[in-house]
Image (tube, rainbow, N blue to C red):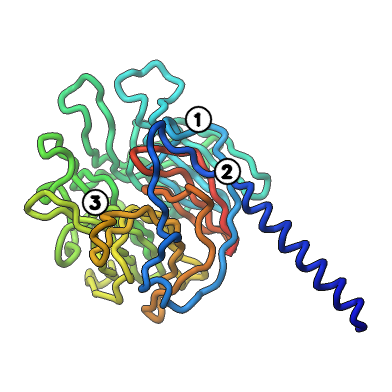
Amino acid sequence: MNRCGIFLLVLLATQLSVKILAAEEKVEPAPPKKGVQPAPPLSADPPDAYSQLPTFGTIKWETTKLPWVEEGPYAGISGVAMDVHNGKIVVAGGFIPGGDETDDRTSRKTSRWCWVYDPATDKWSQLADAPDRREYGRGLCAGDNFYVFGGGKQYQKQDPPYRPHGECFALDLLQQPPVWRPHSQLNVPRTHMAVGRVGNYLVVAGGNEYVWAEKGYSQNTIRNTTEVFDLSQPKLGWRTRSPIPAVGRGWSAAAASQDHLYVLGGVTWNESGKTVGLRETWRYSPQQDVWEKRTPPPVAISGWAGALYQQRYAVIVGGVMRDKEKPERKSVWSDLAWVYDVQDDQWQQLKGALPPGAVFNDSAVVIIGDTLYVLGGEGPKGSHYNYFLKGRL
């Protein structure tokens, strides 16, 4: 190829690079609440422990919005139950600061909605409302059922005005239209648990048993409880098994393989009532009822969420980092993406920060094929958003 041809190729490549950059710059940052100036996200000053990790690859983000939730920062949604069934995403519950369309003034900020998203058509369809309102519960699909576990509910002008619940529900997706039915109740009512389907077992670990008299969260409310439901023996119900070693925790990321549930990071409370971030990774075998300590995350992050990719890599995003090495920044909203290799017990970095402002706590995350889906979340100073992010791995 002559010099002129080479020059043209370089020029075209440069123009393409500029166009891509321009497209990325058009991503609208998450608007802050009035009078609030959010601190820079973690990618503005990534910790050395992150930068030194080997690189897994790159994730490219697309920002879309949920058509059934009002705009943030005063509305939006967080804390939904979500999982994948036959290539479609099923969502139920969540905290919706703007309230739903009902006249129920008692609990209308705790959602009862249920929706399904089809990536093939890029369409949302509404299913039957859940039997009761729930926020910050968890959801798992197994067979043709979508299970919703625990969660909390607001009770305005009642005492107490917020309560955790242990009731569980199952949505029979084989029926048309899908039908809800009661499911075995948890022994300990909780929010913000780590959950996963491990082979034939549903596992719920940790979480917070909200107590209004304790101001919601304390060393007395945080739990290390592990409960297991054997799908092959449903009459046994939820059985309490070996607790998470060390301290109770919630707001952990979780990922499940065929043999283990992985509980990553999270937060607890000490005797003084202060929040303590956890740099811990635990692996649980429901078959053996054994917890094992694994390589800890490089920094302490809570409120993040992830899913298992290619049956090996836990891809985790969002949350809040608590940095002991830099006490001047007590907590920083994380827009970084992390990877934990469950096979080699190794942490890696994933290039490609979440879109501007999308540094969310209590989002829900699933993976379909090579795409990571992140739904909703809480931002700085109690802001909430209706973002539905798609990250191509």
Which is more toward the observer, 94 or 198? Answer: 94
In this rendering, which labeled residue sits more in front, label 3 or label 1? 1
Label 2 Cα neighbours within 10 Å, binned few <14 / some 14-19 / many ≥20: few
Q: Residue furthest left?
A: 271
Q: Residue 298 sits in which quadrant?
A: bottom left
- In the rendered image, which residue does mark 2 sit on? 28
Image quadrant for the N terminus? bottom right
Mark sitting earlier along the chain (3/1)? 1
**In this rendering, does residue 230 appear at all?**
no
Q: Residue furthest top?
A: 103
Amino acid at dot 1 = Glu
Q: CA distance from mark 3 to mark 2?
A: 34 Å
Which numbered dot is residue 70? 1
Q: Residue at x 50, y 30 (%)?
A: 70
SS class, disc 2 = loop
Which numbered dot is residue 234? none
Which is more toward the observer, 26 or 135? Answer: 26
Label 1 Cα neighbours within 10 Å, binned few <14 / some 14-19 / many ≥20: many
**Residue 252 image offset from top left, x and y in percent:** 30, 57
Mark sitting earlier along the chain (3/2)? 2
Amino acid at dot 2 = Glu
- In the rendered image, which residue does mark 3 sit on? 207
Q: CA distance from mark 3 to mark 1?
A: 28 Å
